[in-house]
Image (spheres, helix red, strand yellow):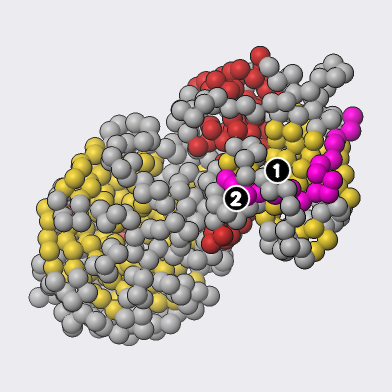
Amino acid sequence: MKPCNCIRSFAVLRAGPRHNRIAGALAVAFFGAMVSGCGVQTSMQSSSQQGEVLRGRVFGGQQPVSGASITLYAAGSGGAGVGAYNLLTPNSVTTDGSGSFGITGDYTCPTATTQVYIVARGGNPGLAAGTNNAAMVLMAALGNCDALMSSTTINLNEATTAASAWALSQFLGSGAIIGSTATNATGLANAFAVANNLVNTSTGFAPGSTLPAGAVTETAKLYTLADAIASCVNSDGTAACTPLFAAATTSSGVPANTLDAALNIVKNPAANVAAVFSAAASRGPFQPALSAHPKDWTMSVTYAGGGLDLPGSVAIDSAGNAVVANYFGGAISKFSPAGVPASATGFPGTGLAQSYGIAVDGSDNVWVTNEQSVTGANNHHDGSISKFSPAGVEQSGYGYTVGGIYYPSAVASDTNGTIWIADYGSSSATLLNNDGTAISGSGGYAASALPFTSAVAVDANHNAWFAVQKGVASVTPAGVVSSFPCCADPAGIAVDPAGDVWVADYNASTVVELMPSGVVANRTVLSGGNGGPQGIAIDGAGNVWAANYYGNSLAELSGASASVLSPALGYGLDAPLSEPYGLAVDASGNLWLSNAGSNTITQIVGLANPIRTPLLGPPAQP
């Protein structure tokens, strides 16, 4: 029997394992409806384009640094933090008494899109003649080599260094060496773009000139870290650097220079938070700065517009664009890796209605679940699936309704091109071919045997794992179902590279790990403000991330031990998170969270280990 829509609307507000997430706004909508150094290569690589003349200055705070050694690097492609090489002939230039330098075109771009950056080492920050601060290492992330023009002006200082450390943390090794795998050039380039959102390398001030209109970033936090770095830079590099280096010490040792210190801080954002803040002068050279220490040293950028209207799930395509399902508005949203909306109002679809779930397939097509369907698709309004091309063109008309689709809530894409769908209304699963034709029967797989399917993830054997009422269930491509009790209120689900299944247990504020056999391996309670884990994702290192809907925060768990790695209240408390619902990891190591409470999307910069995108089955290294 098909449920009455109005009765179902009331029921899901009370008991649906997913629908309680978007609380206030949906409540109004439903009831309204019812009523109505290491790794540097010195040899030049194959060249294609002679470099332009470049000019710039190096500052410690607002003080020019003379005698600094300037090197222009091309990022390596042999792995994270290795393989960068010097583009200059001779090997470096030196700043003059005003901190100025010139690079007279004595370099060649290996390719137009080679990512390049500039580093200043040592120098005198306005102290007695003969002083050389060997602990000073500053950098600026420039981007595509062919974008360097004769008009390019570069200002290296502590703010450009802090921005580079955050955005490039997954690619930056000790000694100012940046590298990625050869297969992740896109992730590296996108990380450079984010760095230029955070700071303007022409002026040395934040935010960057490329930051989209309406975007909000934590400039005061960036300036505070810059001030902490400045306490060491504006010295002879000895005693004045001790507070910063002590606060930035990790299990691998004490940093020897300012860039390595900044990198240690942003890669361990919950460590020594107050001590890092104390390393900054009370009135440092970069203002406005924080008046008290932050909750952590994560960095966020929050983007608006693009048609966001009660955003739900998030997915990332092969170019690093974030696509978002919207419950209202009849459009999907798409943002570039640097947060620029692809369309001011989103990409509309005739079949879009009450959309929660979204996935990207191997050809960058976008699949969206519609809990309701328009009349042209299904006279009973039982829901549909919409498919969009990479350009945002709707390919499914009023939406696909075959294979048992019935109030679909979530969707996942497999490596073989098939599409799995969680059918909340019929407690079943649908499996489609990539052209929208059905593999599952007209009633779907295991109708009524998958109670309230609300989330789905795919393992390496093409089996789908569903979050269901009080547990999880696996479904083979042939429709064989196995059920496993585990949880109070499963909301999100993910499969790691080892095949373990991770569940965000919403009402219990717990993350549950199950082995591939379905046996519970770990049950980790998220204490404090980590309330209501909803979205869940695995990064390239196998660590687990959960978006806490009520905590307005982000939790991180070790994939190896299931122990909590984030602070007691979670990461991101300084960011404007508002009822974070969807969560995805990109190939730069950024985490993307949709904010159902504010119609925005937040990018936590460089905090996670990168994954290959789009996500097809378990996450993999890019």
Horizontal side of 148 relative to 356 (left or right) equals right
Q: Which residue is mark 2?
A: 179
Amino acid at the residue labelled 2: Gly
Residue 32 location, quadrant = bottom left
**Secondary structure at numbered mark 1:** strand
Provide the residue span drawn in magenta. 81-97
Q: Residues within 10 Å of mark 2 (few under 14, many from 20)?
A: many
Whole-angstrom CA distance, mark 2 to mark 1, is: 15 Å
Residue 430: give its label: none
Q: Position of residue 502 (x, y in %)?
A: 26, 51
Image height of 216 relative to 242, above or below: below
Which residue, given by chain and number where applicable, does mark 1 sit on? 140
Report if residue 278 is visible in the image.
yes
Q: Is tag 2's residue or tag 1's residue first in the polypeptide sequence?
A: 1
Q: Identify the amino acid type marked 1.
A: Ala
Dot 2: element: loop
Callout 1 crowding tier (Cα within 10 Å): few <14, some 14–19, many ≥20: many
| Horizontal arrangement in the rendering, residue 539 relative to residue 173 (left or right) | left
Please state which of residues 601 and 472 is positioned toward the viewer in this rendering: 472
Q: Is residue 94 magenta?
A: yes
- Identify the residue at horizontal 38%, vertical 35% (top origin): 566
- Left or right: residue 100 versus residue 535 is right
Most common secondary structure along the magenta stretch: loop
In the image, residue 140 lies at what x, y percent? 70, 43
Identify the residue at horizontal 23%, vertical 47% (top origin): 513
Residue 207 colored in magenta in the image:
no
Vertical comparison of 53 with 139: above or below? below
Res 327 quadrant in image: bottom left
Q: Residue 126: horizontal and vertical position, in percent?
A: 83, 22
Q: Is residue 9 visible?
A: no
